Amino acid sequence: MKISDKELIDLLQKAYSAEKAAAFAYQGHAGSVKSAGEQAAIRQIEIDEWNHRKEVLAIMQEYEIPVSRYYEFRFQVVGKVISGSCYVIGWFMPFYFAGSLESGNVCEYFRMKHHFNALGIRRHDSILYEMGMKEKEHEVYFLKGIENSKLLPFFEKLFNWGARKSFNNVNLDEKYPVEESDVYCKK
Ligand SMILES: [Fe+2]
Ligand SMILES: [Fe+2]
């Protein structure tokens, strides 16, 4: 079955490639932190991103959506550059920008769900919900790591993400179940 929702196709193609960029970035991030606990946590997040990539590909294949060569190239470069930069920009920034990227990714998955639902397709609801929630867990992990840093209020003002500001309206302490998750990420 093919779908003609251009925005949805683009969301899927972009997410597929961006997950690779994230996984590469976390390789550098894990390699650059000193604490063994942080290293293990970031390695696990890298594994989560590879899993997301697999799940997104499975959905794309169902609708014969090709992998975008442009996104694959672009995000390959992005991922490798971020990965390398983790070794030189200190400890705070990799945590901060990982958290802010994860924050934005949460809604990508809920947006895909909105699009599928608008087409009357509900069978991807739970996997998209789970992936969105997993990105939220990643966001929270990185935020916890820097919440006591003196740099955070300054960065929050500059980049609109931090202890008070998020790019999504998901709250892990008061989660809506998948059936009621339409309240998330409505524009
Ligand atoms: Fe992901
Ligand atoms: Fe993530």
Image: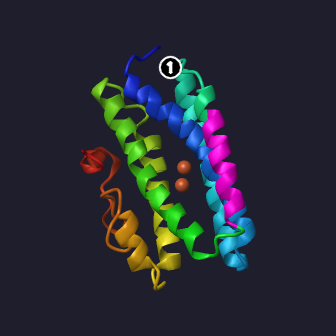
Query: Is 9 part of what is drawn in magenta?
Result: no
Residue shown at the point (51%, 68%) measured from the top left: 96
Badge 1 is on which residue?
Answer: 63
Residue shown at the point (30%, 56%) measured from the top left: 176
Residue shown at the point (25%, 45%) measured from the top left: 186
* Main SS category, magenta section: helix
Q: Residue 105 in the image: state x and y as whole percent.
A: 45, 50
Up-down relation of residue 149 to residue 86 (above or below): below
Residue shown at the point (31%, 23%) measured from the top left: 119
Q: Residue 46 in the image: state x and y as whole percent.
A: 65, 56
Taking the image in four quarters, ligand 2 sits in the one at bottom right
Query: Is 76 part of what is drawn in magenta?
Result: yes
Q: Residue 50 in the image: state x and y as whole percent.
A: 65, 46
Residue 112, quarter of picture: top left
**What is the number of callouts on the image?**
1
Give whichever of 174, 168 is nearer the camera: 168
Up-down relation of residue 140 to residue 72 (above or below): below
Residues drawn in magenta: 72-86
* Kind of residue sitting beneath label 1: Tyr
Q: Residue 12 in the image: state x and y as whole percent.
A: 49, 33
Is residue 81 in sight in this rendering? yes
Up-down relation of residue 61 to residue 20 (above or below): above
Mark 1 beta carbon near ligand 1 (under 8 Å): no
